[in-house]
Image (spheres, grey):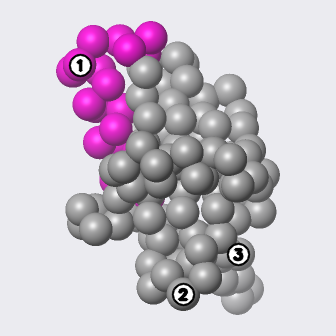
Amino acid sequence: MKKELRIKKNQEFQEVFKKGRSFANRQFVVYVLAKEGQTSFRIGLSVSKKIGNAVTRNRVKRYIRQAIFEMADLLYAERDYVIIARKPTAEMSFFDVKKSLQHVLKVGKVLKREKQTER
């Protein structure tokens, strides 16, 4: 994921927390804020020290970034997303992380509908 697609500054995180909507499941909390005129979505990640050591936290962040990269065409462009990982993510595989992230984004209705396959 390109660095310009990431939210880095504390002020930008706080804006999403205060003005955005939140959705959650057992593994993730996702905050979403619509931003008019933004050409692509931006992602902010928060993985607490409660999740584990640096190796574990970085692995969780890599999994989340890769899952978002694979779902990029299903995310709306003019939005900021802040994803907060909860404790169960420490023991999850990449496919579990992706499935859980898809679930929470569907719950929040921020995932575009996938094209229906013809039968």
Q: Secondary structure at mark 3?
A: loop
Q: Earlier in the sequence, mark 2 or mark 1?
A: 2
Residue 16 belongs to magenta span: no
Crowd band around label 3 with a 10 angstrom C-alpha radius: few (<14), some (14–19), many (20+) = few
Crowd band around label 1 with a 10 angstrom C-alpha radius: few (<14), some (14–19), many (20+) = few
Identify the residue position indicated by label 1 in the image: 54
Residue 63 belongs to magenta span: yes
Q: Is residue 105 left or right of residue 86?
A: right
| Disc marking residue 113 | 3
Quadrant in which the C terminus is drawn = bottom right
Identify the residue position indicated by label 2 in the image: 37
x, y percent for residue 3: 24, 62
Q: Which residues are magenta?
A: 49-68
| Residue 12 or residue 96, whichever sits in front | 12
Considering the whole magenta stretch, tell me its main secondary structure: helix
Q: Residue at x 39, y 55 (%)?
A: 7
